[in-house]
Image: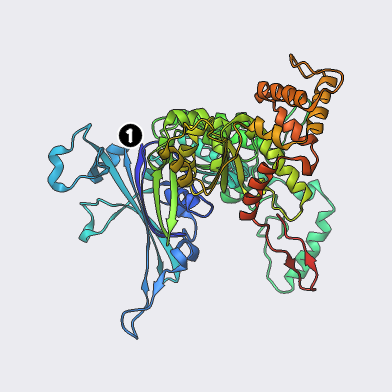
């Protein structure tokens, strides 16, 4: 089964949203745009256990906390404002179709809408597919002074007096929805609490264990006083004092007070029973929570694969930040697993290793304005082709997507060298906010001709864009190309040199260039570059340096040279450009504490 549409009204930070999905979905956007709220909404309408909480929703689940408005008349009772979440499911399993057949409607695949009653003649694949519309309504009940929420079939032709038919909990379980909050799932994934991954596996396999009855029986007969005789005098003393105020009667069971290791209820045992594992040879078993966070999350992945294997045709995942505390190769495995082993996955992420796995056609850019959330496929919004996206995802594109701004350069030399200049400037001036902390990343567009399209891509994602590129000394740049550069970059710098190496040779002192060459030779890193033992004249030094820098672009020699420069020896054209960027991202204001002292603001 798959979700093709999700409508949200008055839920948390979303006043309204109407989102369309086409299979696996990565949601990107600025912080607090509503990515997690979309996952929570899916959990409310599809998850089998969320509504069993008490209360299932609260004041802050309503947009701006508004769930009541004054009545129309002055003395009228306040009116409630409900929250509504509706999901449309297609590719229904045979079991769901059998149990929910009376509520089935039809979804027009191309037009992405429900068919009206008069269009039933078109209700045939591939034009239209059977679908199921589910709706969760949450509201405040003034009479009971509590919040309520229930899920219904939006299409309820057999409902009494036009009312919607509630969805039974066993039917909701058939939807196979799992919501994994990474920061909150690991601590209970291997417990037996209701809704934990281990509990879901037991239910999916149809296990009806007698564990609870047997365990409670054994715990009830466990004599703690016999195991710790020093407890008995204390308990008897407590009994005597209680008997002064309460008539205690053990009714032939010995003493009136006892100590047990649990409350002897299923629910308490679910919370206290713990999964143990041995982490290394020779080590005794320890509670799984004592393992490292990365190990716990890897265990979660193992359980997810188990669940998907049990119900491969129905599992829908919503997963927040699967990269938490796991190494890059595991992040990629998690993303690959979600894309290949589930019917549909909804993911939020801040990891380039996860983002790169999702095609731009699978990636939704969420925006919010006045509480209204909208979404566009990155491929539609930016025009960036899939091949370009795949090619550059691993070489900085994904990292830039997660920041606030991108400095776009045209070659690998600048990509290696300019961050060194920025760092040297930051180290020398404590008043500068480091670019990485400001969320500014460097990106190699692999040629000036590619720079505008990537700038458009970043701008559409809400990033600020800055350009640094070579002089058009041959006059080949067309007017429309120049205009595209000017239109898409906030800071657009065409430096006055034919290439970055020319800039370095013109603006770094010759003495520093010679010192750098001598160091290469001393370290036997000059390769085929001939460096004489005695210093030649300045022109010869420049010629040798040009051959070295131009012939070793991938070796990062310009970056190494800048590491050896004094601050005033760094290229002025580069430092002037970077100062413009630093000026756009000032550091936070110092904090004045209550005693009047000055505390440095945390970056």
* Residue sitting farthest toward the bottom: 75
Q: Is residue 143 visible?
A: no
Local packing at callout 1 (Cα closer than 10 Å; few below 14, some 14-19, many 20+) is few
As drawn, 379 above or below 226 = above
With 536 as the anchor, is 269 left or right in this view? left
Q: Position of residue 145 (x, y in %)?
A: 45, 71
Residue 344 or residue 223, whichever sits in front: 344
Q: Is residue 292 above or below residue 534?
A: below
Residue 536 showing in the rendered view: yes
Residue 466, by quadrant, is: top right
Query: Please, which residue is most extreme toward the right here?
Result: 534
Residue 384 percent across, percent down from the top left: 43, 35
Q: Secondary structure at mark 1?
A: loop
Residue tagged by mark 1? Answer: 93
Residue drawn where x is 34% and y is 85% of the image: 74
- State the residue at coordinates (54%, 30%): 446
């Amino acid at each position: 089964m798959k979700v093709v549409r999700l409508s949200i009204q008055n839920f948390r930070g979303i006043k309204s949203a109407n989102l369309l999905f086409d299979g696996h979905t990565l949601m990107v956007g600025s912080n607090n745009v509503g990515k997690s709220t979309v996952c929570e909404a899916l959990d409310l309408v599809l998850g089998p256990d969320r509504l069993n909480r008490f209360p299932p929703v609260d004041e802050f689940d309503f947009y701006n906390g508004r769930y009541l408005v004054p009545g129309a008349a002055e003395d009228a009772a306040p009116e409630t404002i409900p929250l509504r979440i509706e999901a449309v499911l297609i590719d229904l399993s045979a079991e769901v179709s059998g149990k929910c057949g009376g509520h089935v409607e039809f979804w027009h695949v191309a037009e992405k809408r429900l068919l009206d009653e008069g269009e039933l003649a078109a209700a045939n694949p591939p034009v239209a597919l059977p679908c199921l519309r589910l709706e969760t309504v949450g509201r405040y009940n003034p009479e009971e002074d509590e919040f309520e929420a229930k899920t219904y079939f939006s299409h309820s032709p057999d409902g009494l007096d036009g009312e919607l038919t509630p969805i039974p909990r066993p039917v909701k379980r058939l939807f196979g929805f799992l919501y994994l909050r990474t920061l909150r799932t690991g601590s209970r994934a291997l417990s037996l609490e209701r809704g934990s991954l281990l509990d879901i596996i037991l239910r999916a396999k149809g296990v009806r264990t007698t564990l609870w009855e047997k365990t409670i029986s054994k715990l009830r007969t466990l004599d703690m006083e016999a195991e710790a005789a020093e407890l008995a005098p204390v308990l008897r003393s407590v009994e005597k004092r209680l008997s002064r105020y309460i008539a205690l009667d053990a009714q032939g069971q010995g003493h009136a007070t006892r100590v047990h290791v649990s409350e002897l209820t299923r629910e308490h045992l679910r919370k206290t029973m713990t999964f143990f594992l041995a982490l290394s040879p020779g080590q005794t078993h320890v509670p799984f929570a004592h393992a490292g966070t990365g190990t716990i999350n890897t265990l979660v992945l193992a359980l997810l694969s188990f669940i998907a294997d049990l119900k491969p045709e129905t599992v829908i995942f919503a997963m927040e930040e699967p990269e938490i505390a796991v190494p890059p190769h595991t992040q990629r495995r998690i993303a690959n697993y979600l894309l290949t082993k589930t019917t549909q996955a909804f993911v939020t992420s801040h990891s380039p290793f996860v983002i790169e796995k999702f095609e731009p056609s699978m990636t939704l850019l969420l925006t919010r304005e006045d509480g209204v959330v909208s979404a566009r496929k990155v491929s539609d919004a930016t025009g960036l082709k899939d091949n370009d996206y795949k090619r550059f995802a691993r070489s900085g594109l994904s990292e830039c997507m997660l920041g606030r701004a991108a400095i776009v350069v045209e070659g690998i030399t600048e990509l290696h060298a300019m961050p060194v200049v920025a760092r040297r400037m930051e180290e020398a001036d404590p008043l500068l906010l480091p670019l990485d902390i400001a969320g500014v990343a460097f990106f190699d567009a692999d040629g000036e001709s590619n720079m505008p399209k990537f700038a458009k891509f970043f701008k559409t994602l809400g990033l600020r864009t800055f350009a640094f590129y070579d002089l058009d000394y041959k006059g080949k740049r067309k007017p429309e190309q120049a205009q595209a550069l000017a239109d898409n970059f906030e800071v657009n710098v065409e430096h006055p040199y034919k290439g970055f190496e020319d800039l370095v040779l013109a603006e770094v002192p010759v003495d520093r260039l010679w010192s750098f060459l001598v160091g290469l030779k001393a370290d036997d890193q000059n390769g085929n570059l001939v460096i004489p033992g005695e210093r030649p004249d300045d022109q010869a030094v420049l010629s040798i340096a040009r051959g070295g820098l131009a012939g070793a672009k991938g070796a990062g020699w310009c970056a190494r040279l800048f590491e050896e420069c004094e601050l005033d020896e760094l290229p002025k054209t580069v430092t002037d450009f970077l100062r413009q960027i630093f000026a756009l991202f000032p550091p936070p204001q110092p904090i004045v504490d209550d005693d009047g002292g000055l505390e440095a603001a945390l970056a």
